[in-house]
Image: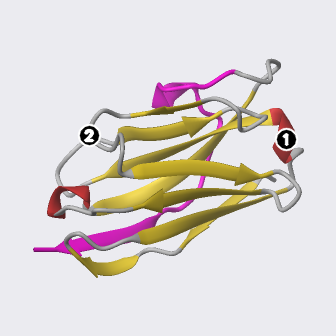
Amino acid sequence: QVQLVESGGGLVQAEGSLRLSCAASRLTFSMYTMGWFRQAPGKEREFVATISRSGGVTSYADSVKGRFTVSRDNAENTVYLQMTSLKPEDTGVYFCAAVFSVGLSRVVVPAQSYNYWGQGTQVTVSS
C-alpha cells in the first residue's frame, strides 16, 4: 500500500521559514506528479503547489507564489515544500498527495485528481 509521510511542520513566528518533507514509499515515485495542499480550521482543503514527475514544471496557488518553493528528489522518493515569509494565514494542516502521470511535465491542481494522500503535518504561524 502506498504511503506518504509528511514531516517538518511546527510553530513558527510570522516572517519565519519552514521546510516540509513528504517521504513516499511503495510506489515508483518518479512516475507520480506530486502536490501539496493545506486545510485551515473550518475551511476546505486548498491547493498550494504541484510539481511534475521530472521536477521541471511547477505551479503554485497565488497566495503562496514567491514565498513557497516545491521541489523533489526522485532518488530519495521525497518531495519538499520550502516555505518562507510565513504569514498567520498560512496556518493549517499541510498534506502531500500523489497521482500517477504518463507525461513528464504534467502538473495537477484539483485535489480530486490525486489518488494518494498523506496524513498531514501541522503548521502554525504566530503573529
For the residue carrying disc 1, how many other residues have a C-alpha within 10 Å: few (<14), some (14-19), or many (20+)? many
Relative to the observer, which residue lies in front, 32 or 86? 86
Report the Cα–Cα distance between label 2 and label 1.
28 Å
Taking 55 as reference, is 4 above or below it? below
The image quarter containing residue 53 is top right
Residue type for callout 2: Ser
For the residue carrying disc 2, how many other residues have a C-alpha within 10 Å: few (<14), some (14-19), or many (20+)? few
Residue type for callout 1: Ser
Q: Which residues are magenta?
A: 106-127
State the residue lying farthest toward the front. 66
Viewer-side label of 2, 1: 2
Taking 94 as reference, is 52 above or below it? above
The residue at the point 53 percent across, 62 percent down is 119
Relative to the observer, which residue lies in front, 47 or 117? 47
What residue did someone put label 1 on? 30
Relative to the observer, which residue lies in front, 31 or 69? 69
Taking 91 as reference, is 113 above or below it? above
Does the magenta run of residues contain 119?
yes
Does the magenta run of residues contain 90?
no
Give residue 69's position: percent from left, percent from top: 50, 50
Give residue 18's position: percent from left, percent from top: 43, 71
User: What kind of element bears circle 2?
Assistant: loop
The image quarter containing residue 80 is bottom right
What residue did someone put label 2 on? 63
**Circle nearer the N terminus (2, 1):** 1
Left or right, residue 124 beside residue 1: left
